[in-house]
Amino acid sequence: VVIHRESMEFEKETGLSMWDTLPDDIILHVFSFLSPFSVVRMSETCRRMNEIAFDEQLWRQHFYQYYRISRSIGIAPGKTSWLQEFKRLYYHTPAVKGTIIKQHTDQVLHVSFSHNGKMFATCSKDGFIKVWNSKYPVKLKYKYDMRTLTWKYTQFSQFNRTDTLLLVSGVHFGSHSTSGEIAVFSLKGDFDLQARVINKPYDVFGTWYNDNYLLSGNLHLTGPLQSYSSIILNKGFQDIASEHESVVMGLYRFENQNASSIRTLLVAKCLTDSESELDPNCDTPENSIPEKCDTPANNPAICCPVLAEAKTSEKSAENASKKVQQVTVYENGALREKLIEVDAEVKNVHEINSTITYSQAYRDAEEDIASTSVEMETKSDTESSNGASGSFADLKMKTMKSTVSMKSMEGVCTECTQTDCEDHCNRGMYTSGSVFGYPLQSNILFSRDGSHVIEGKNPFPEEDNRQSNRKQQMDCSEKPVGSEDISDAPSTSKNSSQLPCQFPDKYLIFTRGSETFTPHQIGIKRMKSLEKVIGDKVQVMPNVEENLHGMDHQGYDTVDHVIDLHGHIIGLSLSPDDRYLYVNCRQWPKNYSIENPFYPPPIAQEIDIHVIDLMKMKRVGTMHQAHKAYTSNDECFFIFLDVSNEYVASGAEDKHGYIWDRHYGICLNKFPHNDVVNSVAFNPSDPETLVTVSDDQSIILWRSRNRDKQIRTQELRGMNSMCANS
């Protein structure tokens, strides 16, 4: 009461409140005890509070506290504002349940987006493949009942790079069938069937080699527990103009061990200049993932500032987290019940919020990639400005000093200054307050269409040369379906020496096994480019007369790199730049001895996420016990995950989908369903939208708070317009 009276007397005498006389640092100290949202409300009271409320050091503190991030992790490379990072994670990350679609009559197994983000496809046990327009409101565009082609159900789909063809993988009828098939549909016109390809086993899934050719698999038995898997190149559409043109060609033959087989094919760009850059000791499973590598997962001292305390508490947590589980195992030539020691469902005390813990090598690579991106942007910006004053660094400093708008905090699209941006400019807050958001990119420079390597020079030439260079690149680009095939199309150049194409090597990535039939290893084979310049044509397959269909193989092909994850692999996804491979894996008990390949070890209910650097061929990150799976080893199925520039998401058997930030490693949101979440997918053109599909037969689009507000505002304006017209 006395203080209140003194305050009132002071205000009468001076016309100022006591808040006006407090130094800025005192007010900042007070703000540090408030919640981030209370700070925002305080900023609306007056101009001075608005200026103080958006202090970067204040928001740095709120960022670490609110998201429970280890302070040893710095701001993401390419980012410059803690406030903008807080807004990105809170307002611009998928979190709000949007459109719910229930037009499948059975479990929905997979979802995938087109590269332009305008469509997504869903596969289901009802036998249908369905393609949807992703723009709000979502509408069905195509559908096809694959049961008319003797399919049991559809399980996987993938769009080619130009979004003109859709690869659909499925399973044949039969209670114990392991055979599958791949179908290719045209996305132009009436969703016409272009090709059908045998695929065995069915969980090879298949993948695009390039825009017009796809890879499939086949399993060949050669004896008891002996077989080999062949990888086959197929043309994506078989309306060929000449009987001399090949549509199928054998590529590799890999010998299988212990009833295992090649599964889950992926193709990634090879980001290394030469094979000599890779560590020659990475080829063996023993060296692929060192058991005692110096990573935060194995050495908590890296991410914990108090080393002594960390070691002590970690030992106590380890001792407290041991439990036993009764399982059926195969030992001494017979099945018997056994109690084995497994890790309990207790997280490390320093493992905040099931975070991805990265090695220092990953952090260093982040910095290198970000600096490369800034250099590229700076050079491109300087050259395109034609001598205009001001560098990219100057622009960044000017932007950082600009006033932070409260409207941006509430979700106004700063790209077009509208709250209901119909085109979803997708930058959102990225241009408000700071310049950041560089995606992870390879140190190798690619042309704008991503198809050709340009080594040793700027990939974005001066403005007056861009048109001519773009025309040259189009001469070598892959033709979409309906146009003349690349192997037959004459180049605009007069001779092959003028073709600007350089076809980079690729990595063939697959799962395999050596100790048991369950996939527990990542196999990687470096593929030399199949494209060849012959005269004025670019040809992928040899002519029929020269095509031996793989019969010229002597023996078996070797696998260049094998990375053993010591658990059942149930999901794979590449980062958008093809640099990192994210893997869902259910771990085996430590030191478990496998006596019979038909009886693999019991697997953990917790799913770990491993991050593999495809430039270094080693694991650089791990997230332990991130999400759940309950089925046994012999019934274990795929849980698909997806990776965007800044996020990674996955389904789970605990009836939730999950999303994590790639840099900070934290779990940002959970997406509830009524049954197993089988697959998730980000919209490539709008990372604020995520789709999850589930055994509950539903498809759900999750949107950021920013996107959700834009859509609701758009709906409200539409309703008001209808009322006015009526």
Image (spheres, helix red, strand yellow):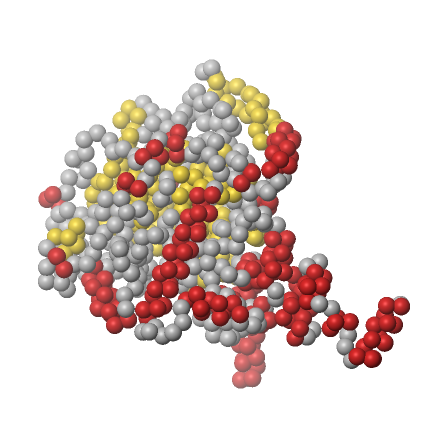
Judge left or right: residue 626 versus residue 570: right
Quadrant including the C terminus: bottom right
Residue 347 image point, x, y percent? 60, 38
Judge left or right: residue 147 versus residue 669: left
Of residues 254 and 4, the one nearer the viewer is 4
Of residues 159 and 560, the one nearer the viewer is 560
The answer to whether 497 is drawn above or below residue 710 in the figure is above
Residue 411 image point, x, y percent? 56, 68
- Which residue is rendered at x = 12% and y = 57% of the image? 496
Of residues 592 and 263, the one nearer the viewer is 592
- Which residue is rendered at x = 62% and y = 35% of the image? 308
- Which residue is rendered at x = 50% and y = 75% of the image? 417
Quarter of image, res 21: bottom right
Judge left or right: residue 549 versus residue 163: left
Residue 20 image point, x, y percent? 73, 73
Residue 257 image point, x, y percent? 34, 27
Quadrant including the N terminus: bottom right
Of residues 239 and 257, the one nearer the viewer is 257
